[in-house]
Image (cartoon, rainbow, N blue to C red):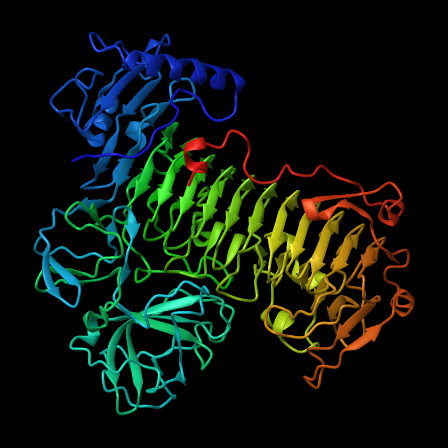
Amino acid sequence: MTSPVIGVAFGPSILDSMKRREFLKLSAGAALSLVHQPTRPPRSAAVQKAGEAAFYVSPSGNDTDPGTLELPFATLHRAQDAVRQSRNRSQPLTVLVREGTYYLDRPLAFTHEDSGTKEAPRVYAAFPGERITISGGRKLACKWGFYQNGIMMASVPPGMKFTQLFINGKRQVRARYPNYDASVPGKSGYLEAVGPIPTGTANPFASPDDDMTFSTQAPRGIRFDPQTFTKKKWANPEAAEIHIFQAAYWGNLQWKIRGIDRATNSIWFGEGGQQIGAKWSHNPAVLNKASRFFVDNVFEELDAPGEWFLDSQKNILYYYPAQGVDLDSALVEVPILEQAIQFSGTQVNPVEHISLRGFRIAHTTATYLSDYEVPSLSDWAIHRGGAVFAEGSHHCLIEACWLDGVGGTAVFVNDYNRDFAVVGCKITEAGESAICFVGDFEKTNGTQRSFPYECKASNNLIHDCGVYGKQISGVYISRAKRITASHNLIHNMPRSAICIGDGTWGGHVIEFNQTHDTVLETSDHGPFNAWGRDRGWSLAQSHGPYTADRSLDVWEALVDAMEPVIVRNNFFEEKSGWGLDLDDGATNYEIYNNISVGGVSMKLREGAYRKVYNNIWYLSKGAPCFHVGNNYNHDQYFNNITVMDPGDSKWPDGWPWWPQMFYSIIAPPAIGPWLEKVDNNCFYCSTGEFQAVVDQLRSEAGTRNPKRYSLKEWQGLGFDEHSVFEDPLFEDPSNRDFRVRPESPALKLGFKNFEMGQWGLTSDFPKQWSKG
C-alpha cells in the first residue's frame, strides 16, 4: 500500500517560535546523520528530545511490527491507532513517515480521540529529506495493448470509476470536443453557444421532475451551431458532460447530458448546473450566445495525444499517449477518494493540536457534479468538501505540504473551527479553490458557533487552480470571523486570488499578499473581491431605481459586518479586472498601503464605513470607481495616488476609456452626501488631464448620461478640494519601488511612504516547494 514523494520538518509546537526553529535545525541534522549508520540506527531526533516519543511508517514496514525506526508500520492508519493507544497524554508524540506513496483505502480521519494538547501535540510528518505522497487514489497495473489510430487500451478492475487520470504525476485530458487548447485560458478550446433552448420548447428527454419548476431555476439546455459542432455521432451521449460559462462569465457550470437533438441542434441537460447560484439574482445561471463550452467524456472524440476515456461498462481504459510517454514504464494513477485527510470533531468534542507536515497530498476525485449550496448572498455556490476537510477542530495545522492535482477544493475548513492554519504550503492544479473558510449562518444560533474563527492561510504558494470550477479563489472566506490571509503568492487563476463572500462577521486581515495573472477566464472581478449582501442589504437599493430608500438608518450595515476588515500592504499586478473590487454592499473596511499595477484600480460599490487611504494605483486602465452609493455611508477616500496608463487600452469588458478620466462615479441624479470624504489625493497621467465622470446609470429613465468634470468643477461639487493633478515622482516604479521622492506633491497632501518588497512568500517558505 505504498511508494514515494516529499519530506520536511517535525517537532512538537506550532509555527514561528525561534526556539522551535533552532530545535528543528539541530534535530533534522542529527536525524539525517544517524540514518547513514547501518549497524544500529539510533532513534530519530524527534525521540531524542526529552519527553517525546515517535512511531515510524514505511512502505517496507508491517502493521504487525511495533512501529519503531527499525521495525516500522506499513500504513498511516496503523500509526494512528498506535497514537490513540498511547496512554501518556502529557507526552508529545510524532509519527515520522518514510519515503513512498501511501494509497489510502479510506480517508485518514482524526477525531477527538486522536487529539493532543498544547504541551503534548500530535504531529504526523515526513521524515527529514524524504519525499512522501498521501494519495486518495490507486496505482493501476496496466497491461497495455494496441487499439487503433495510436490509441492504447488496458483492462481496469470491475466497477472502477474515475474522472481523472494521472500519467507520471501529470493530469491527462478526458476525451473532449473541441480538443484542449490552453493558449488563451477560457477562450481557446471552446465553442460558442447559439443560445439557450427557448422557453416552452418540449423536452424530448424530460425527467420525472421536470414539472417541478421554480424561479431562478437553471437553463434546460443550449442550441449549438452545426457548422462548428462535431460531425461525429456519439453512441452514448448520456455519458458526456458539458462545461459551459455563465453569460456574464462569473464562472462556469457543468451538466450531464440528457440527450442531443440534431434536428434542432440542441443539447439537453441532465443532472448538474449547481455551481453558480446567487440567491439575490433572478437568474444567476443564465446562458446566452456568448457562453463558451466544451463537452467531454466522449469516446468518439478520443483523437489527440494526452486524451483518455474510461468505458466503465466494459472496464476498459483507452489512452492516446502524450508525446514522450513510455507506457511500459509509466506510473498510472486514478483518484478514488474525495477526501484524503479529515479532521472530524464537534464544537463539544473537537479535534485538538494535530499537525500534518511535509506531505504531498494528491489524487482526489472531482466534485463539480456533487451537491452545492450558496452559503450567503454572494454569487458563489460551493461544495462543502476538500482533499483536506476540517470540521470541529482546535489548533490544528497543515504545514509545508503540497496539495497537487486534487479534484475539488484543496483545503476546506467547514463550520466550527478555531485556529486552523494552512501555512507554508504549495497548492497547484486544484479542481476548484485552494483554501476555503466557510461557516453556516443557519446553524449559528444559541450557543452554536458554526463558523471558522481566528483561522489562517499564510505563506502559501497557490497557482493554476480552478481546473474544473471557474468561480473559485485562492483563499475564500464566507460566514466566518477573524480570518487571516497573509504573505500568500497567488497567480494563474481563473477568478480571484482572495475573495470574501459576505460581511459576516468581519475582523479579517488581508495583508502582504502578492498576486499576478488572476481573473484570467472570468469577468467583473478582481484579485481581491468582496461582497456584503448581508441581512441589511437590499437588492432594490443595489440594483433598482433611485427611488429606493438608500439611507444607512434603514440598512443597519454593522449588524453583520461587526468588525472591520483590514486590507493592507498587498501587491496586485494584473492585466485586467479591478485591483480591489468591493462589490454589492461590502462594508466596514480599512484599506491602506496597497499597490495595484495595471487592471482598473478599485471599485467601491454601495456599502458603508470604507476608509481607503495611502494606496497606489499605477498604470491603471480605469479610474477609481464609486459605484451606486448609499446616503450617509461614511466612506472616506484620501491620500491615494492614481497614475493612469497613457496607452491605448480598454476596460476589462471592452469598454473604451479616456486617459484623462480619474473618477468614474455611477451616482443618483443629484450627487448626495454618500461620500463623506474625498480629498488630498494625487492624480497623474502623462498624456491627459483630470476629469471626473458621473454616469447616471440608474436614472429614473434608465438611460446613461455621463457628465465630465474638470478638477476645478469637481472641487466645486465639494470633492478633492485639496487634491492635485501632478506627477507623484516615484523612486523606481520599473523595479517595484513605489516610494515617492522627498519633493513629491503627494507627501505634501499627507501620503506616507511605506516599506516595499515585504509582500509575497517569506524566506522560510519550504525550499522543496519553491523549486516547482
Residue occupying image coordinates x 17% and y 51%: 327
Task: Out of 485 and 144, give the one closest to the viewer.
Answer: 144
376 w.r.t. 658: above or below: above
Q: Quadrant of residue 705?
A: bottom right
Give the number of callouts. Answer: 0
- Residue 51 position in % (x across, y down): 35, 9
Whether residue 608 sits left or right of residue 45 in the image: it is: right
- Residue 615 position in % (x across, y down): 73, 49
Q: Quadrant of the C terminus?
A: top left
132 w.r.t. 119: above or below: below
Q: Quadrant of residue 145?
A: bottom left
Task: Out of 706 and 661, give the one closest to the viewer.
Answer: 661
Whether residue 608 sits left or right of residue 372 in the image: it is: right
Is residue 158 visible to us here? yes
Q: Quadrant of the N terminus?
A: top left
Residue occupying image coordinates x 68% and y 49%: 595
Residue occupying image coordinates x 26% and y 74%: 257
Whether residue 586 sits left or right of residue 439 in the image: it is: right
744 w.r.t. 373: above or below: above
- Residue 23 position in % (x across, y down): 45, 14
- Residue 687 position in % (x across, y down): 81, 66
Is residue 391 visible to us here? no
Whether residue 432 sits left or right of residue 323 in the image: it is: right
